Amino acid sequence: MDTIKREEIVNLFKDNVKELIGSDVRIKGWVRTKRGNKNVSFIALNDGSTINNIQIVAELTNFDETLMKKITTGACIRVDGKLVESMGQGQNVELQAKEIELYGEADPNTYPLQKKGHSLEFLREIAHLRPRTNTFGAVLRIRHNMAFAIHKYFNDRGFFYWNSPLITASDCEGAGEMFQVTTLNLDNVPLKDDKKADYNQDFFGKSTFLTVSGQLEGELGAMSLGKIYTFGPTFRAENSNTPRHLAEFWMIEPEMAFYDITDNMDLAEDFIKYLVQYALDNCKDDIEFLNKMYDNELINRLQFVVSHSFVRLPYTKAIDILLESKHKFDVPVSWGMDLQSEHERFLVEQHFKCPVILTDYPKEIKAFYMKQNEDGKTVRAMDVLFPEIGEIIGGSEREESFEKLTKRMKELDMKEENYSWYLDTRRFGAAPHSGFGLGFERLLLFVTGMANIRDVIPFPRFPKNATF
RNA sequence: GCCUCCGUAGCUCAGUUGGUUAGAGCACAUGACUGUUAAUCAUGGGGUCUUAGGUUCAAGUCCUAAUGGGGGCGCCA
């Protein structure tokens, strides 16, 4: 038996498994459940390659009783046996065990995972073990597939993968609070004469932070390679306690020379639809599981998104719709305000019942680098709003005029010298260009139907929590 | 950061207007059953009711604080 090739369980659920029926197969994996009677045990085994378990059938006369007792939920075993068509209902094939080796026990009195009834909140407290559950196996396989599809999408369309730095010296990117990066001894910080920390002695000779966005450096990529995208971790030190925020999350930021705001919207919509369709095509078993267990509307919602055009609407018209709606909002609506969650949700979930791209926001509520419209009041921003999740994409056409951009920076009290490298894109060979940022975990919320962003990343980072 | 709700067995939860010895399912142990599908059936072990104060003849239940978790809001992706 020693020479049998190990099969991953996913291969036993493919159409060509018939070729293996009758032959000896070696399976390795973790026990999900064991059940049976005094003659025979049925072991559901999973190796992570698929959500499906292979049923191991063990005639008890062939196996040592103490070995069988140690085969409990969570234990890791190797099984050699003959693959046969199943006599029972519920599975097509099963493995008639000939030899079982126990790799690792899992004491059922202390192993936290059981075969039923765990809340997502409880699993969050044992995040190091939760990938072994059906739910997190499904979510994390989908996560991988989405990451792969993102690279494939851009590669197939001539985009280059661009790595913006994670450590940045610009402490005013404007997108949120930043984590400081330092090698100074915090118990004994070297001080200058004015009693402030002497960052000349720090690792980089100045104060540095973890990036809140790769966009500014991404624009340098677009101004050279034409079309680039970043896909990497991003850090926000905001004290955000919501099911939609993480302190460490992954973001995809494409940036394209010669794209205007319409090209940008077209790309964003096509990109999301591609990813959702990719999930439907390639993560069928996992999505069907999530649809069955958590959200019966999940598949319908995914199919709806890929088959309907997103509504595109200027901010000003959105304000009109909200004002005319007669809906009672907690925060009253007026032009110039930043839309609240309740307003976005009304537009997406009740008025249009469809993803919405809002454009042309007031410049006061958007970032300095967005292209200014002729009206002097609005900028060519675009936010893609999704049901339940809210803003899944934020982007814009960029202001390429050196004069307009630096004027806006002065209005916002930003120091030009801190951005000299960025402003070189406008000094030398400036070009119209656009880009956006897609929150990877927010995309995953939509694709998996999970409700809390802490459940779509293996090890979530959020205020007061960096365990695991 | 603000506002709310919750914390009872390893897990999921019930526990009435405050009243004797705090219950159920799953898990675990023992036994039964010739193929199970969250297997089933019987029996059994398992509790500092988050923690610390307080009210009361009496607190799982009421009050205060701490702590952990959920939801809503803000910040945003």
Image (cartoon, coloured by chain):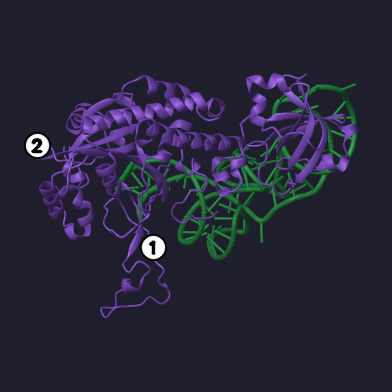
Residue at the image point whose x is 68% and y is 22% from the top:
A17
Image coords of residue B74 (percent x, y): 30, 46
Residue at the image point whose x is 46% and y is 27% from the top:
A278
How packed mark 1 is, by other alpha carbons closer than 10 Å (few <14, some 14-19, many 20 or more), is some
Image coords of residue A325 (percent x, y): 23, 26
How packed mark 2 is, by other alpha carbons closer than 10 Å (few <14, some 14-19, many 20 or more), is few
Quadrant into which the N terminus of chain A falls? top right
Q: Is residue A116 left or right of residue A342?
A: right
Q: Secondary structure at mark 2?
A: loop
Give the farthest residue toward the bottom: A193
Residue A374 disc label: 2
> Closer to the camera, A140 or A259?
A259
Image coords of residue A310 (percent x, y): 30, 25
Q: Amino acid at mark 2?
A: Glu
Residue A425 disc label: none
Which chain is depicted green?
B
Q: Secondary structure at mark 1?
A: strand
Residue A90, can we see it? Answer: no
Question: Label 1 lies in what chain?
Answer: A
Q: Establish if A182 lies above or below A276.
A: below
Residue at the image point whose x is 54% and y is 44% from the top:
A121
How much space separates mark 1 and mark 2, taking CA atoms?
A: 41 Å
Q: Amino acid at mark 1?
A: Val
Which chain is depicted purple?
A
Q: Is residue A349 left or right of residue B57?
A: left
Q: How many marks?
A: 2
> Closer to the camera, A432 or A453?
A432
Which comes before the other along the chain, label 1 or label 2?
1
Q: Establish if A62 lies above or below A194.
A: above
Residue at the spot of label 1: A181
Q: Quadrant of residue A31?
A: top right
Q: Quadrant of residue A11?
A: top right
